[in-house]
Amino acid sequence: MENPNRFWIRLTVVFVGIIAVVVLGRMAMLPESWGKYGYYRGDSIEEEAQRAMKYGTNESCKGCHSEVSELKSHSAHQRLSCEMCHAPVSEHAKGSNKFAVMPTKKGKEQIGLCLSCHQKTIGRPEKFPMIDHARHLAAQKVKPSHTCDQCHTVHAPLENINHVKDQRSLKEALNEN
Amino acid sequence: MRTKITQEYIDRDRRSFLDKVFKGTIGGSLMLMIPMHSPLFAEVLNEEKSLKDTIDPMNPNANYCFIVDVSGCIGCGNCCVADRKENDVPEGQYRTWVERYVIDMMNKVYVDAPHGGEKGYSNIPILDTIKEVKEAFFVPKLCNMCDEPSCTQVCPVAATFTTPDGFVLIDKEHCVACGYCVQACPYGVRFINEERKTADKCTWCYHRVRKGKLPACVNACPTGARKFGDLNDKESEVAKIYYSKSRLSVLKKELGNEPQLYYIDLHGEVV
Amino acid sequence: MVTEAMNYVFPNDAHAHWTLMIVIYPYITGIVAGAFIVSALAHVFNVRSLMPIAKFALIFALSWLLFVTAPLLNHLGHPERALNMLFTPNFGGPSMMSGFGYIYMSYSILLIFEILFIYRYEMVLLKEKSSGVKKFIYNVLTLWTNDRSPEGRKIDHKVAFVLGAIGIPLASMLHGYVGFIFGAVKTVEWWFTPLMPIIFLLSASVSGVAGMILFYIVIKKITGRMDEVSTDTIKTLVKLLWTFFILDFLFEMIEIAVHAYGGTSGWHHISSALNGPLEWSFWTMQVKVLSIIPFFILMYLSLRNVSRGVLMLVAPLVSLMLLAQVLFMRWNVVIGGQLMAKSERGFATYHPLWFEKEGILMSIILLVAPIVTLWLLSRIFPLWESESDREHSA
């Protein structure tokens, strides 16, 4: 005659075993830095902080392209990021030993670039200098295929125009005299 | 002696010198001759360093804040482009985007954001549907970095959390991608990254901030419509705005998430 | 007045993210919870007329229980990390979903232990008659014990009673918490209601009881033992089904009514969804065809003295309709909530494909698998009341 309690006693042992596996498993599997700052894996913060940047800042270009930087920093385009019109610095100056080609936009592409900010579009604030491409070029009496940099210096867009204006007014002033 | 000559050469025209070095006109051996104290070398090394490993320690005393000046946004999409590249966001998913609100004379509200505004805006198709525009503006959207985030609350495995310096981040090694946070976020900024198969969202470029740089989108913004800084630093632009008379508001205030993303003079129609 | 003129959703929300998998997951847990409640009524509350299917209810629950996690694992982006749910549950959040791992585990242990106690004596008897693999399985399941004493059986029944009693709240939790997962999301107006856990529990009971009726009769029919089907049992089940269904439908409608009466901005959005993308699946299917018609059929079956022939034909049909009703309800909750985009200015879309990873075919497979499993389990656990059970209860 077998002990009638045997089954439930054995099953209880199984149950305790399951709990032990879960408890031990949890202890073993808990990531090391868990709870360093709170109830999460603390190291993930440093992992995120260490992720490499792709874009630098305009300071990144200064060292090697001082002329352009200087020109731009006193112009209407001073707030613009060099990298947005060109490419991220990480694709250009990879440390001290590799220069990839830095795209400079010419022709149609350049017109598209300038118009992406300056084309008159519903939604743009009124105070922002906008042009209607066709009208702008017509007003200057040039063909629609004229690129913007034929009149504006890209990095300081009013530089030479103001220059010309200054000269003209100087001439006019001289003529009047 | 030799060093002096090289130095002069470099000083005369740094860029064309470098140009030649890297195009191989000047041999690699010359490279070795460049004195270590040359300012050029220092510059290059500095550049590399600042890009990579000058990570500041965590600053738990900072109260970081993001302010968007809606009236400054021109909808160029630079922020979205920069963000996608900086953070390797897959096509068709958005850590940040720019919406356009157009209100016509009948007070009808039209909202669109083709490609999340990444490719810029044009008047088509808005102009076909609207006869007279009363008001129109762009609204950049990104993570609200809530003080009371719904997303961290619902994460079943604590793979998203608020850091001691106040950023809501995702542990992409721990996330199971159940998508509950995607449902819970009231602002729709979360998504399951198609490539990594984990939850993903804007981090206010935590990796840049810890290196003393501005978030990529702030850096890319041509008009300064996006502003980021520490409110506890009274000299910062955000602190000046925050403590001035300008009218700041947050999105979906009634939900009680207490976002740290503020908008200046936001139109009431924006959700 | 400002009106919306364009369908606009946030760019990340263009498509529903929770797919068909998340529709059938609560569907499966619902059937588990509902079937367990039937067995508990017999084992704990001693409802005599349910005795003939008390064991079947347990095995039926188990066969669906084994597939509760399948749709979830198929949906997860990183199924290999699923155990994080046990290792680092975010109870502090508190995240409703983090309870899943432990609730599911506890409930699984409880159900399996309950089955082992209920079947122990029978398995000891069966062990002798079987050989090979089957004998080994019985040995494992009885933990190599061979006790046949009346004392042993008494212990079995006592423990099974206690486990059943604990099981009722646990089964309710297993499913009520699924309702809470949705009900606690304040972002989605369609989900955010304290009624959600109650609706989920009641609809779980509906689907469980309906499943019992359908499979009881169909299995008996297929095995050619229709004469063994107890009219009394079916009548009790039908009444039970009717009661649960009235409550379920009542709460579903109360939810809508409160929203509508409140006339909140949330209702503005909900009503345009219910009259737009959800019109067919909600009003037509869930409410009209699959609720109102079954309600009257059940009323007729419950209140009138119908003949056995009619009962055995109509009861499984109406059960099938209610099983479909619950499935539509899950769809309307899970998918419907996601269609109402957070931009409050339009609707997301969701069109499941047949052959995608989380598509229609996969869903069908996952809904058929428990039935196949039931057949496999029936080779080890005899589904119906045995001679020894009847002796004992008499």
Image (tube, rainbow, N blue to C red):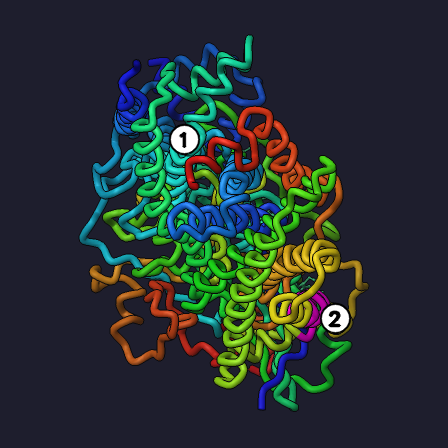
Q: How many marks?
A: 2
Q: Label 2 is placed on what type of residue?
A: Pro
Residue C81 in percent (x, y) is at 44, 32
Question: In which chain is the residue bearing label 1?
Answer: B
- Find residue C391 and report its image quarter: top left
A141 is within the stretch colored magenta: no
User: Residue at 41% of width from left, 68% of height from top?
Assistant: C194
Q: Residue C254 or A88: which is nearer the viewer?
A: C254
Image position of C83 with respect to B33: above or below:
below
The C terminus of chain C: image quadrant:
top left
Q: Dot 1: what SS? A: helix
Q: Residue B123 or A59: which is nearer the viewer?
A: B123
Image position of C245 with respect to C219: above or below:
below
Q: Label 1 is placed on what type of residue?
A: Asp
Location of mark 1 (residue): B11
- Find residue A14 and report its image quarter: top left
Of the numbered discs 1 and 2, the one sitting upstream in the chain is 1
User: Residue at 57% of width from left, 18% of height from top?
Assistant: B25
C282 is within the stretch colored magenta: yes
Residue C337 in percent (x, y) is at 56, 63
Q: Dot 2: what SS? A: loop
Q: Residue A14 or C315: which is nearer the viewer?
A: C315
Mark drawn on residue B125: 2
Residue C286 in percent (x, y) is at 66, 66
Question: In which chain is the residue bearing label 2?
Answer: B
State which region is magenta: C275-295
Q: Residue furthest left?
A: B61
Q: Categorize mark 1 by other alpha carbons within 10 Å: few (<14), some (14-19), many (20+).
A: some
Q: Is residue B111 left or right of residue B52?
A: right
